[in-house]
Image: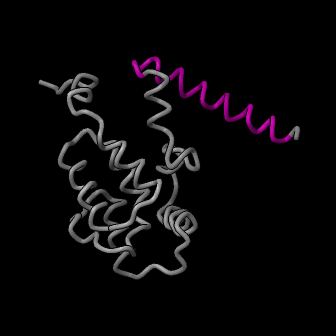
Amino acid sequence: MAMRRSFEKGRVKKFEKLLEKAKKRGISRERLEERIKVFGGIVWLSKWRRMSFEEKVGFAKRRYGVKKISREVIEVLKELDKGKIDYTKIKGKEFIVALPWLYELSFSWVGTIRRNVSSALRRIGVWNKDVGRILERLSIDEYEQAREKPLPL
């Protein structure tokens, strides 16, 4: 019980440090909480970005109960990890392990990337709460985004 409390205290302190940095940049607490959570707080977005490719694949396999991933899927995941991808390659239920990468891409300010993510979700053809979160993330009004981050001149 005492270990759990100390663990939670550590998480709170870490979040407070992140909140201080965000305030300096002009980001609200709600926006920060929205940006750093991935799939209900299981993995923080900052931690996800520090993970190696193998750790990310392992997380996705555990998350979705996939025992084996084909080479084709691994190649597409590597491209997703680098940010260079032809989204039409993502087809079928075997690409369910790509959901964490698609979630990360749903935070993009670029509209074409967001549209490509939504079309990739449609081609995967699976519905679960993670897909719901990604679609919720994608449904943010573009006007609101433009207001929060103006385009450089």
Q: How many numbered markers are drawn?
A: 0
Q: How is the image coloured?
A: one colour
The picture quadrant where one finds residue 125 is: bottom left
Q: Position of residue 145 (x, y in %)?
A: 26, 29
Q: Is residue 1 left or right of residue 120?
A: right
Q: Quick one: quadrant of the C terminus?
A: top left
Q: Quadrant of the N terminus?
A: top right
Q: Is 142 positioned to the left or the right of 95 in the image? A: left
Q: At 81% from the left edge and 41% from the top edge, which residue is drawn? A: 4
Quadrant for residue 147, please give it.
top left
Q: Is residue 34 above or below residue 75?
A: above
The residue closer to the viewer here, 5 or 83, is 5
Residue in view at x 27 percent, y 67 percent: 123
Q: Position of residue 136 (x, y in %)?
A: 36, 43
Where 124 falls versus 115 (above or below)? below
Question: Whole-percent x and y of residue 29?
Answer: 49, 23
Residue 22 sits inside the magenta stretch:
yes
Q: Is residue 28 magenta?
A: no
Question: Residue 115 or 12: which is nearer the viewer?
Answer: 115
- Image coordinates of residue 114 in percent, x first then y, are 25, 48
Question: Which segment is the magenta one?
Answer: 3-27
Q: Is residue 133 depicted above or below 65 in this figure? A: above
Furthest residue to the left?
153
Of all residues, the one furthest to the front in this rendering is 127
Looking at the image, which is closer to me, 116 or 151?
Answer: 116
**For this rendering, which residue is in front, 100 or 129?**
129
State the residue at coordinates (37%, 75%): 73
Main SS category, magenta section? helix
Q: Quadrant of residue 128?
A: bottom left
